[in-house]
Image (cartoon, rainbow, N blue to C red):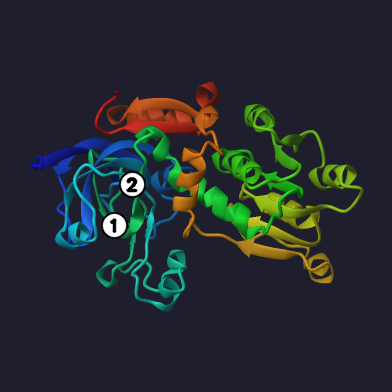
Amino acid sequence: MNLPQQMDALVLKGVRDFSIETVPVPVPDDDEVICQVDTTYICGTDPHIIAGDFPGFWPTGFPFIPGHEWSGTVVQTGSKAARLGWKEGDRVCGISHCGCGYCEMCLKGRYNLCLNYSHEERGHRQYGHYTPGAYAQYMRTSVKSIFKVPDAMPLEYAASVDPLSIALYTVKRSRMQPGSDILILGTGPQGLMAILCAKALGAGRIFAAGSGERLRKAQELGAIPIDYKEEEVVEKVKSLTNGRGIPAVLECAGTAQSIKQACLAAAKGGVVSVIGIPHADPSLPLKRMVLDEVELVGNRANPNTAQETIDLLINNRIDLRPLMTHRFPLKEFKTALDTYEKRKDGAIKVATKPNGME
């Protein structure tokens, strides 16, 4: 396919300084493909990147194209990518992490912890974080970071695989057993997706701590609601479990208070699986955690869960449609971001369309 030389992209030029600009269409390396982007969702990390909350890290410099929850169609392949079976017309979705493939952690399958992180010259990438991302008409990506999308799945749906597979990874790391209780603290997009994943994996009772419209959404999805603004979370959990607590706890809020509550709400021998990132390190009830053998597990991204997520979606084990609330052309990104950040009209997952609305 003959690609244009120029494309529209969201270019971040500094802290909260962005605009839609015309930039060159990227050219693939041997193991890369160029995709025409269908959908890019706003991730909870994106506003922090735009606001400069990770200076010198995400991104490492300006100008920069963010965006990492995306789907699209392959329109050009590098020579090695073609030999590996990728071809024009393949419908794909992407994840942000691309390990070097050679270090000890990558060889263990833990490419989210690649020892060459941030060294593009050594083969590592993290799309939309410090490697150019998907708020653009065309996306350049390694084939290590894309997955084929079944014909029966709309590409707008497939763009959610990255965040949903993170939620799946977080649930699995809690070692939740079928039929057992699980507690999810935080009812933002990640917490709501965790509810769906826990249901798909056979959770018994699903408790969700949150507030407002999003807590009501959690209840609609099947969770037992706990309003942290009206109730003391740990006391409520204990009252609902005969004082035992919950064997699997997910922390999706990323606040110091929520992380401490998660550790106190866990049952003896329980696991607290954390995906939220607090602004400051919290104090933890370590005496209780040691004596009751409560494990605290950190989670980064979604190693080896994207294909499982696609399978859950295509087999109708998870229905994401209740979370897909808004769509905007990329040229209206400012409005899309404002809608997401201020949660306007019940916004949860806000999609942008770099190549126009259907």
Q: Which mark is residue 218?
A: none
Q: Amino acid at mark 1?
A: Val
Query: Which residue: 9% across, 39% down?
Result: 4
Q: Is residue 170 above or below residue 159?
A: below
Is label 2 in a helix, a strand or a loop? loop
Q: Position of residue 75 (x, y in %)?
A: 18, 44
Question: Foreground: 221 or 96?
Answer: 221
Q: Position of residue 116 (x, y in %)?
A: 36, 72
Would you say residue 334 is visible in this rendering? yes
Question: Foreground: 159 or 147?
Answer: 147
Quadrant that contains the N terminus: top left
Left or right relative to 354: residue 218? right
Whichever of labels 2 and 1 marks the residue nearer the N terminus, that label is 2
Q: Position of residue 224 (x, y in %)?
A: 75, 35
Label 1 neighbourhood size at 10 Å, few (<14), some (14-19), many (20+)?
many
Q: Is residue 255 above or below residue 340?
A: below
How many numbered badges does the structure rendering display? 2
Q: Amino acid at mark 2?
A: Pro
Contact? badges 2 and 1 (CB < 8 Å): no
Would you say residue 277 is visible in this rendering? no
Residue farthest to the right, as pictured: 242
Q: Which mark is residue 66?
A: 2
Left or right relative to 221: residue 80? left
Question: Foreground: 176 or 334?
Answer: 176
Residue 155, by quadrant, is top left
Q: Position of residue 146 (x, y in %)?
A: 34, 52
Residue 266, by quadrant, is bottom right
Residue annotated with mark 1:
143
Left or right relative to 227: residue 173? left
Residue farthest to the top, as pictured: 345
Quadrant that contains the C terminus: top left
Query: Which residue: 37% across, 66% down?
Result: 99
